[in-house]
């Protein structure tokens, strides 16, 4: 294991905990922090993959790839080319170069814009999770599942707890991170493990345990240490009404003490897994759910929650079939509103709060979202 204390210290110094002053070395950090376009052009939020140095943006049909002017935010004291707000032709992927304050260190990001001519393709990817394809982070070596279409286009739909872990611990192989791929049924499944955490991270955050997790959405790395519950941003665009959540899983709770967020054991508490999905409406006040509100926000219309989250019997994966239940009487109208679906798996239900039992393991495979449209088709 290799700690990243030096990197984190430099990062926090450069982005505002203190200032890079004239008598100190110039800041070497070079990073794109945000990449945005007008909301009317976006099909979903841009996904910045810091480990792979890539940015993927899904656009609505009316977007003109030949003339887009993204607003780009970089860390303090850095510059970027093409400049923020500059009009660029994105017919092919474009490289954005960030130059650090020291003028020496640079970082290139490959930006890919995809116009969603057929939204049904994306919807299909959001309904069938086989975990067949994984991409390894070239810098920190953690793996993340991706979705692929028949033409080979890769879509970044999932995020994992690995991204947060890589801020303070770096491992040489994906299998040492909390979430990774394992072989199953001539393909792959997703495995999540709750591990002991590093404890105090530079006095910024106390992390007694780290749970393996996998969810549709993205992680806001700027909040990962200072405000972890808001760092997990859960949900991707979804344009059908979900009725059932199915798949296969195996869960074994850890045999040791259940550790609370303060690092102390909680006698008598057993760990449990998280397998759930929520369908919610977005508006000007809510663009995405996070760990603070994914269970109780009033915009959540439908929820599917695995009822028995305790350990399963035997070594085989067990089928689950969960009905989406209504949490309110709101009418779902795709002509007037936009909606998102968050699908969440974790080896510890309260892992996002740094609670759980080290050694808890969850394996999931072949998860599916069944919608009203699917049931109509199958009835013929």
Image (cartoon, rainbow, N blue to C red):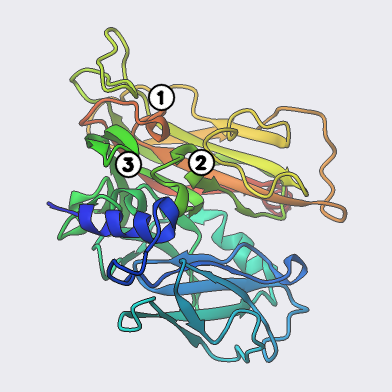
The residue that label 2 is drawn on is 246
| Position of residue 28 measured from the top left corner of the image (x, y, whole percent) | 31, 72
Of badges 3 and 1, the one in the foreground is 3
Q: Would you say the residues marked 3 and 1 are in contact, meaning their CB atoms lie under 8 Å apart? A: no
| Position of residue 248 measured from the top left corner of the image (x, y, whole percent) | 40, 41
Name the residue: 58% across, 30% down: 295
276 and 42: which is toward the camera: 42
Instruction: Name the element at disc 3.
Output: loop
Name the residue: 72% across, 31% down: 298
| Position of residue 342 measured from the top left corner of the image (x, y, whole percent) | 57, 45
Nearer-N-terminus badge (2/3): 3
How far separated are the C-alphas under marks 2 and 1? 15 Å
291 and 7: which is toward the camera: 7
The residue that label 1 is drawn on is 309
| Position of residue 271 measured from the top left corner of the image (x, y, whole percent) | 32, 22
Instruction: Name the element at disc 1.
Output: loop
Nearer-N-terminus badge (3/1): 3
Name the residue: 27% across, 42% down: 202
Q: Give the answer, above or below, for where 68 lies relative to 177.
A: below
The residue that label 3 is drawn on is 212
How far separated are the C-alphas under marks 3 and 1? 15 Å
The part of the image, by quadrant, that contains residue 345 is: top left
Label 1 crowd (10 A; few <14 / some 14-19 / many >=20): some
Outermost residue to the top = 268
């Amino acid at each position: 294991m290799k700690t990243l204390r030096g990197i984190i210290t430099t990062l926090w110094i450069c982005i505002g905990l203190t200032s890079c002053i004239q008598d100190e070395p110039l800041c070497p950090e070079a990073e794109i922090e945000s990449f945005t376009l007008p909301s009317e052009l976006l099909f979903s939020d841009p996904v910045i993959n810091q480990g792979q140095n890539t940015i993927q943006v899904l656009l609505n049909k009316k977007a003109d790839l030949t003339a887009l002017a993204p607003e780009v935010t970089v860390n303090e004291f850095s510059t970027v080319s093409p400049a923020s707000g500059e009009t660029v032709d994105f017919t092919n992927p474009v490289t954005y170069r960030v130059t650090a304050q020291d003028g020496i260190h640079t970082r290139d990001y490959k930006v890919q814009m995809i116009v969603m001519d057929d939204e049904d393709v994306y919807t299909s990817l959001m309904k069938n999770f086989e975990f067949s394809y994984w991409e390894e982070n070239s810098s920190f070596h953690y793996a993340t599942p991706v979705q692929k279409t028949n033409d080979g286009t890769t879509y970044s739909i999932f995020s994992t707890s690995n991204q947060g872990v890589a801020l303070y611990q770096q491992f040489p192989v994906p299998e040492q991170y909390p979430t990774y791929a394992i072989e199953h049924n001539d393909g792959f499944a997703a495995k999540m493990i709750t591990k002991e955490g590093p404890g105090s991270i530079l006095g910024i955050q106390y992390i007694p345990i780290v749970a393996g997790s996998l969810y549709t959405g993205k992680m806001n790395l700027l909040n990962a240490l200072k405000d972890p519950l808001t760092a997990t941003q859960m949900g991707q665009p979804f344009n059908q009404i979900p009725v059932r959540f199915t798949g296969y899983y195996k869960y074994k709770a850890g045999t040791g003490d259940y550790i609370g967020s303060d690092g102390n054991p909680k006698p008598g508490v057993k760990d449990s897994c998280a397998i759930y999905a929520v369908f919610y409406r977005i508006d000007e006040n809510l663009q995405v759910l996070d760990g603070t509100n994914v269970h109780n926000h009033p915009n959540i219309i439908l929820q599917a929650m695995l009822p028995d989250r305790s350990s399963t019997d035997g070594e085989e994966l067990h089928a689950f079939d969960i009905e989406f239940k209504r949490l309110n009487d709101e009418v779902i109208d795709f002509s007037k509103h936009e909606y998102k679906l968050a699908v969440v798996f974790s080896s510890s239900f309260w892992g996002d709060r740094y609670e759980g039992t080290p050694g808890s393991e969850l394996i999931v495979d072949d998860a599916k979202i069944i919608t009203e449209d699917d049931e109509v088709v199958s009835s013929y």
